[in-house]
Amino acid sequence: MHVIDAAIIVAYLAAVIASGLIFARRQKDTTRYFTAGHQVPWWAIAASIVATETSTITFISVPGIAWAEGGDFRFLQLVFGYVIARVIISAVFMPWYFRGELVTVYELLQTRFGAPVKALAASLFVVMRTIADGVRLLLTAFVIAAVLKSAGISTSIIVLGMVMILFTLIGGIEAVVWIEVVQLAIYIGGAIAVAVILIQDVGLANAISAGAAHQKFRLFDFSFDLTKTFTFWAGVIGGTFLTLSTHGTDQYMVQRYLCTDRPRSAAKALLASGAVVLVQFAGFLFIGVLLFAFYGNHAPVSAPDQVFPHFIANHLPPGLSGLVVAAILAAAMSSSLSAIAATVVSDLLVIPSEARNPRRAMRISRLIVVLAGVAQIGVGLALQHTQRSALSTALSVASLINGPILGVFFLGATKRGGTSAALTGMLAGLAAVLSVAFLTRVAWPWYTVIGSLTTFAAGMIAAWIWTRKSDSSSSSPRVVT
């Protein structure tokens, strides 16, 4: 690796940690640590949402999807569902988040169903997010290992994880959001730079011709086949349900809305992010077509996720290679550790009232940040030999777990059912979606649909049964002795 590239990468990592130190002085209590005092402008939240949603997984995996044999633009059908869900969340969900002083979205479930339901939903979120961000660390490590020939994947995972922990530990969500604004500019700039280099190498007309000849620009697939991952119906229906869960009931995203001052600001941020995400995904897919024009079907890699890192490591000029690696590191720094800590402290820990004070809460929160970061490093190390697309792995995990959480929020919108009905519904939803995932060939975009609708239906049925039993008991004749 050229010394210029190494200097850019080191400088970026140092700047990330320095930004955490700058914001550390403001972190006096958990309200500031977890919600930035509700003082972040909507446009910064919009950039943060895009950076959060994109991540290293998108930066690396989406070009690989279009490059791979049989790959094309059909992934974009899923993004149509992403946009539809944002409209629904902005109109229906957003006012809920600003009723009272919420720290996490799962507090809404306690108000409706009680502490056990809130604890189950929060626990599922912590598990899902730990796995998904462990995959994110792994994918970033692939790039670092490819560029720094002497760095192993395991070493890269550990180093990246430690920087992520330190950055979030000292700066809180405020540092995370503002560094994500910078990250968005860095990785979009890096992607554009790579596209320009590729176009200079292969020629735009040649790339379009090669892509068209191999049907790389195919966008729509209207077949109703539940085993296909990228179809119009899986995208519009499955993508909508997935985003309703990830952006509507997932603390990782909702935490960012709570950093604004009112529902209207949060809705503007979410809707603006949808437009950017749609254009961005189309751009990453086109980079995949350019990579196909450059390599053909025979790049010296073992998995599609590795084709973009290989190009970065071997075909970019000094300086630009370091910039693009910094862009990938930027995407990896969209840490979920603050959201996990907020969820554990607010929803899972039972702290006696006499023991509650701002300093103690901050110490516990920072300890959770460290433990969650170590767990994510562990996931990355455990999965480093997988051959499956990291994007599919992360999204399928999210689809499996977020479905039952979304379903219980649907149930909460009705006036039927209590704690028992909600728990019954969630357990039924988990059982259904796990059975579908491991016993059938149904594609992962349908997991959230199945999990959420099963949870809602089972909860409604359980509520109806218990209401009938209650009515029957109350109407039974009493024996007077």
Image (cartoon, grey):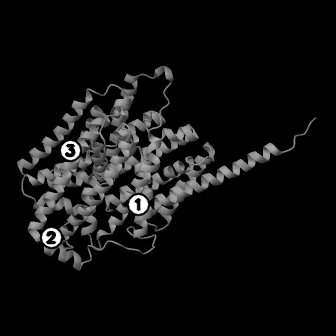
**Could you say where residue 282 lies in the image, as x and y percent from the top left?**
26, 63
Q: Nearer the viewer, residue 397 or 301?
A: 397
424 w.r.t. 171: above or below = below
Q: In front of the other: label 2 or label 3?
A: 3
**Could you say where residue 418 lies in the image, as x and y percent from the top left?**
62, 43
Q: Is residue 151 visible?
A: no
Q: Residue at x 31, y 62 (%)?
A: 387
Q: In front of the other: label 2 or label 1?
A: 1
Proximity of marks 2 and 1: CB atoms separated by less than 8 Å: no
**Amino acid under disc 2:** Phe
**Could you say where residue 169 lies in the image, as x and y percent from the top left?**
30, 34
**Amino acid under disc 1:** Gly
| Count of labels in the image | 3
292 w.r.t. 387: above or below = below
Residue 222: image quadrant is bottom left
Q: CA distance from mark 3 to mark 1?
A: 28 Å
